Image (spheres, rainbow, N blue to C red):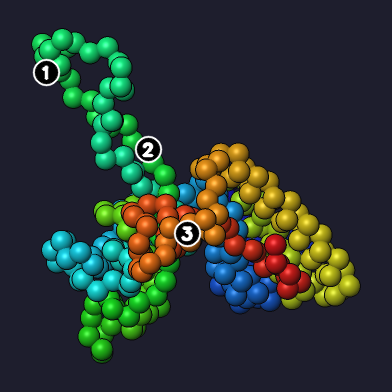
């Protein structure tokens, strides 16, 4: 099955009953030109519109600044009250959460009154095996923002193609602030290859493209309005199913933390009462964005 951008555009055109199809998205016809204008923005919106499993990625972040001064070859300027400042990954469409393992010790030891050997220092076996700590991964507080402290490398005459690098500009870049050292990021990755998309994502993308192509492509504007609204309903249903699937399969916790309760521990100055993980400023994770449709509404 062909999965080129032209194939998806033609599926959208078929959905609204258009008479024409395109052979190439750059061919210059009315349908191709309209599709070319909206293809990339629509794809990014749909990727951000749910936590699609196929577009999930976990990767180490590039450290830009360490406020503790303990990391060589990086800066020490970090936006307060955070300890570490990381570069926005260039293939990141949306940040989901920063995983964090707060477990630092094996355990508290034997509980009071527990049976212990007469010689507590004697090993139970000839060689006591080391017991590694059980990893307990949970999301840490983090914040996405912009900073001018770490611009792109290059001189003023040749700053690089910053317009092609996601999250960067000439004098400013997007950064991720957190108190987690050597942090990874769970995020939605930019994935423009339709053969890697799942069927639900393709259905949503085609329906949203169809809702945006109806008015510029169809001559009968009354019919175009009806088709646009019909495709919007299809897209909403696909997004509902994807978001429900995230609720069934994604990371969730019953340990709900409310902001007013967290604020009770955060008073008395920058960062007091909070550590690397789950209290203090920032967020524990970002949800999905609303997706814009051809009639100007969002869902």
- Asked whether the viewer can see residue 128, the reply is yes
- Who is closer to the viewer here, 204 or 36? 204
Number of numbered callouts drawn:
3
Residue under circle 3?
Answer: 264
Task: Determine which quarter of the picture holds residue 143.
Answer: bottom left
- Do the CB atoms of the residues marked 3 and 1 lie less than 8 Å apart? no
Residue under circle 1?
Answer: 121
Task: Determine which quarter of the picture holds residue 39.
Answer: bottom right
Q: Position of residue 285 (x, y in %)?
A: 49, 55
Residue depicted at 23% across the width and 65% down the height? 66
Residue under circle 2?
Answer: 136
What is the spatial separation of the Cα atoms under label 2 and label 1, in whole angstroms?
29 Å
Which residue is most to the bottom? 157
Q: Is residue 199 above or below residue 258?
A: above
Which residue is most to the right? 222
45 horizontally vs 120: left or right: right
């Amino acid at each position: 099955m062909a999965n080129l951008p032209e194939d998806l555009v033609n599926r959208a055109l078929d959905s609204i009953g258009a008479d024409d199809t395109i052979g190439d998205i750059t061919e210059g016809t009315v349908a191709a030109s309209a599709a070319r204008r909206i293809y990339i923005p629509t794809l990014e919106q749909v990727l951000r519109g749910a936590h699609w499993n196929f577009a999930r990625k976990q990767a180490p972040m590039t450290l830009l600044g360490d406020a503790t001064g303990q990391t060589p070859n990086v800066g020490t300027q970090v936006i307060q009250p955070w300890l570490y400042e990381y570069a926005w990954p260039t293939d990141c469409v949306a940040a989901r959460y920063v995983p964090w393992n707060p477990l630092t010790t094996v355990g508290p030891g034997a509980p009071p009154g527990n049976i212990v050997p007469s010689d507590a220092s004697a090993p139970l076996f000839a060689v006591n095996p080391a017991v590694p700590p059980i990893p307990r991964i949970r999301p840490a507080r983090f914040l996405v923002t912009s900073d001018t402290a770490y611009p792109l490398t290059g001189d003023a005459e040749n700053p690089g193609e910053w317009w092609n690098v996601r999250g960067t500009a000439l004098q400013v870049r997007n950064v991720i602030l957190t108190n987690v050292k050597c942090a990874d990021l769970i995020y939605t990755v930019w994935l423009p290859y339709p053969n890697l998309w799942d069927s639900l994502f393709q259905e949503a993308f085609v329906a949203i493209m169809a809702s945006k192509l109806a008015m510029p492509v169809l001559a009968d504007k009354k019919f175009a309005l009806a088709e646009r609204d019909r495709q919007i309903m299809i897209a909403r249903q696909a997004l509902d199913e994807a978001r429900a699937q995230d609720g069934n399969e994604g990371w969730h916790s019953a340990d709900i933390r409310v902001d007013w309760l967290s604020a009770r521990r955060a008073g008395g100055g920058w960062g007091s009462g909070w550590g690397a993980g789950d209290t203090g400023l920032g967020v524990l994770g970002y949800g999905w964005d609303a997706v814009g449709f051809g009639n100007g509404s969002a869902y």
